[in-house]
Amino acid sequence: MRAMILNKPRQLLQLRDVPKPRPAKRQLLVRIATCAVCRTDLHVVDGELPDPKLPLIPGHQIVGHIEEIGDMVNSKFKVGDRIGIPWLGWTDGECAYCRSNRENLCDQARFTGYTIDGGYAEFTVADAQFCFHLPDRYNDVDVAPLLCAGLIGYRSYRKAGDARRLGIYGFGNAAHLIAQVALYEGRDLFVFTRPGDTATQKAAKKLGAVWAGGSAEMPPEKLDAAIIFASVGALVPAALHALAKGGTVVCGGIHMTDIPSFPYGDLWGERVITSVANLTRRDGEEFFEIAPRVPVLTKTETFPLEQANTALDRFRVGQLKGTAVLTIDTTVR
């Protein structure tokens, strides 16, 4: 099968012909239709996340169809089913985290496109327990970004609690998706962009934000919660300063630059800083139930598999018009 291979961080992916995998116990063999490109893919390729599997097939927003079912897979799947494969690829199911419904924190967890091979390829295998049926409302291209930007965004959103006045710092893929859920649920949305990015601010207001401005600005009202999707540590003190008492700052990325010091007075008043690590299967089940009802809409830009480096390069420098999606099976719907 064809696959784009990362041999070493900070190098271009190489298109190679590699053996087609076979499903082991509890695994599914999946013919990949599409795989969306995520900022985490950039962190892996650029060497910002430690100890990836090498050589590695990146990609963890995978849409495909089951071609073969391994032993001991439960009956909810059958050959031909369309499924999604997310970032969280396996947990031990036995540790204190797994037994307390916090499988996203499992110390032995394996991650698609990072510690196990992912979706920049024609086929992959995945643990059936961590795969999702996908809503029929979406085609193979449009649903792919929901598998990470949507799921991690949703977990970040739920960690923000019942905030009426919700701030979002960084209005990229995850923010755009979860903003739709927030507006659907009646939240007042405040969007913070790079200073001077009036085009994104106008887009946020068009979507329904009550206010949009630069990340150094103060909103017209104190926020009940803020989600930071940009990987910029300096935004944490900025968001804290914009919070009302009892508010929460949620750091929604897997990687962030160092957080600078800030006055204790900005944290006092029972304000909270928390992070989001990975996702749980429950997050996926809840999000794929609500997404078609909103409906959450994605903006995408497609690339063939062999242009994965181009997609990553354009993502890195901010030249994409939507989420980059690799189209691998030409029969995608």
Image: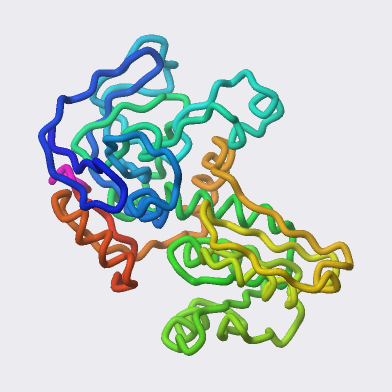
72 above or below 41? above
Residue 330 included in the magenta stretch of the image = yes
Q: Residue furthest right?
A: 269
Colouring of the image:
rainbow
Q: Is residue 50 visible?
A: yes
The magenta span reads 328-332
Q: Residue at x 61, y 50 (%)?
A: 276
Indicate whether 4 appears above or below 11.
above
Is residue 207 positioned above or below 27 on the image? below
Quadrant of the rendered structure where residue 30 is? top left
Q: Is residue 85 visible?
A: no
Tell me: 309 left or right of 238.
left
Magenta residues: mostly which secondary structure? loop
Q: Position of residue 280 (x, y in %)?
A: 57, 37
Q: Residue at 36% across / 51% down in the picture?
A: 41
- Residue placed most toward the observer, 242 or 68: 242
The residue drawn where x is 87% and y is 62% is: 270
The N terminus lies in which quarter of the figure?
Answer: top left
Whether residue 42 sits left or right of residue 255 in the image: it is left
Q: Nearer the viewer, residue 186 or 9?
A: 9
